[in-house]
Amino acid sequence: MSLQIGKSLRNGFDRATNRNAGLLFVMFFFVSLASTIVTNTATAVAYRRLAELSKEMSEEPLPVSDWLLPSVSVPVPFEIILVLLVLLWIASEAVQVISDRTFISEETERLHEPTRWIGWATLSSLAFVAFFNFLLFFYISSVVFLGVLTPVLGLFWALIGGVGTLVLSLLLFFTRQEIATRDVGPIEAMTGSWSLARTNEIELFGLGVVLILIEAAQRFLVLALGSVRQLFTIVASSLLGAVALVFFSAVVAQAYRQLRLEREDDGSETTADSLDPNDEWDDPPL
């Protein structure tokens, strides 16, 4: 059972040009646009509050230059902004679940079961993202801490821990797809991804490099628009970001589907875990 990178990219591109991909693009675009505006607003409010605090505590307050602040923001209290950021984070994960579920299925016209246990799937996806980000934070913090104590030890741990983190990332590559299709919790999803990705780490690394290069090109285009009016830049970056998210979701979903179908052909896939759309879905554990 070996992943074919070229096949995943071709199938992903084909799925990213179907009608339901357009629906997902619209969803990703509006979530991305709203997130950018709310983040800009949070940045502007936080900077102004910091300037006010600096003015109270120092004779030389922090200067508030309008050109340093985002020009596209809304006059909303900071507390409401924090709530909006959390809601948009939840919304983005929900859209990601729907996108993965749709691209893994054979549906090309409509979204595939977008409301099926969407709350549970979103919560599981958020838990996985929080767990993985905690691991990354722990790794980076430990590298900095050991580097301050002993530079040689910090460098050694940066290399060893970096390799371990990379391998773990590859083994958990399909966790979100497991959550979206099997309606399982984060622990069972990570176990399923580990089982599926094992022995395919090199291929998944190659696929990840391709996607990273595409994302780098997308970010370069966004930076190239930096000299244009900020409102246009925000809209354009949201459009490009939505295109990239749809394509990435389609490619990873096709890679996941490829390995799952091969495992079905090998007879190692159980009926309950089958991708057959006629099979009944199990309710998630409560």
Image (tube, rainbow, N blue to C red):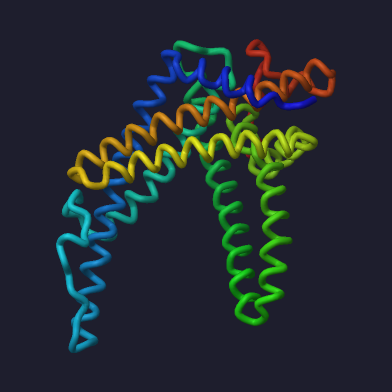
- Residue 65 horizontal side relative to residue 84, left or right: left
Question: Quadrant where the C terminus lies?
Answer: top right
Eyeballing the image, is 156 above or below 24? below
Question: Residue at (63%, 13%) from the top-left corner?
Answer: 277
Q: Nearer the viewer, residue 166 or 284?
A: 166
Numbered marks: total: 0
Horizontally, residue 101 falls left or right of residue 151, namely left
x%, y% of residue 231?
A: 20, 42
Query: Which residue occupies 21% across, 59% down?
Result: 69
Q: Residue 98, relative to residue 126: is it above or below?
A: above
Along the horizontal axis of the image, is 134 left or right of 282? left
Does 173 sit left or right of 19 as displayed?
A: right
Rendering coords of residue 177 (x, y %): 61, 32
Question: Which of the 4 image quadrants contains residue 211?
Answer: top right
Q: Give 103 or 66, whichever is nearer the viewer.
A: 66
Counting from the top left corner in percent of width and height, residue 10 is at 57, 18
Check the image and name the residue furthest to the bottom. Answer: 59
**Residue reaching furthest to the right:** 267
Regarding residue 192, the answer to whether it shows in the image is no
Tell me the quadrant of the picture where the N terminus can be found: top right
Residue 213 image position (x, y, % from top left): 51, 38
Residue pictured at 68% horizontal, 42% vertical: 170
Q: Nearer the viewer, residue 83 or 19?
A: 19
Q: Is residue 62 visible?
A: yes
Q: Residue at x 53, y 25 (%)?
A: 250
